[in-house]
Amino acid sequence: MADQPDGAGPITITREARLQPKLVKELRQMELDAGYIGRLVGGPKNAPNNIAFVVVVLVLLAGLAAGVFAPADRAEVWKYIAPIVTLTLGYLFGRNSAS
């Protein structure tokens, strides 16, 4: 295993990759291009979908927490959460069908 140039930790290189130096070079370039945030949300192709998924999950968790801790305002909370969830899901499915 080799250390990454930015000191972020080791890069795991399989035996097959060692036999193909071009593949190793591409792997390292992709890691440099992605950066720190890219490691969390993915590359440019997958990042919007991953971020939309995280938004849906966080908003749903916030709605559930609000329902547990403030049951009197449950309908008021979901009045704001439901449009965010449907908008995000529409983005995800509309984007995938257009491409």
Image: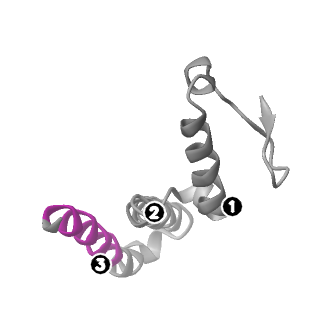
Q: Is residue 33 above or below residue 90?
A: above
Per the image, is 88 magenta?
A: yes
Circles 2 and 1: CB atoms closer than 8 Å? no
Q: Residue at left 81%, top 51%?
A: 5
Q: Is residue 87 above or below residue 12?
A: below
Q: Residue at left 51%, top 60%?
A: 68
Q: Quadrant of the C terminus?
A: bottom left
Per the image, is 43 magenta?
A: no
Pointer 3: what residue?
A: 83
Q: Which residues are magenta?
A: 82-97
Q: In the image, what residue type sits under mark 3?
A: Pro
Pointer 1: what residue?
A: 36
From the top left corner, tell me how far across and down residue 95 is, in percent. 22, 68
Q: In the image, what residue type sits under mark 2?
A: Ala
Q: Earlier in the sequence, mark 2 or mark 3?
A: 2
- Nearer to me, 44 or 67: 44
Position of residue 99 in the picture relative to residue 47 (left or right): left
User: Which is in the foreground here, disc 2 or disc 3?
Assistant: 2
**What secondary structure is found at the residue carrying circle 1?**
helix
From the top left corner, tell me how far across and down residue 55 is, in percent. 45, 67
From the top left corner, tell me how far across and down residue 84 is, in percent. 35, 76
Q: Earlier in the sequence, mark 3 or mark 1?
A: 1
Query: Disc number at residue 82?
Result: none
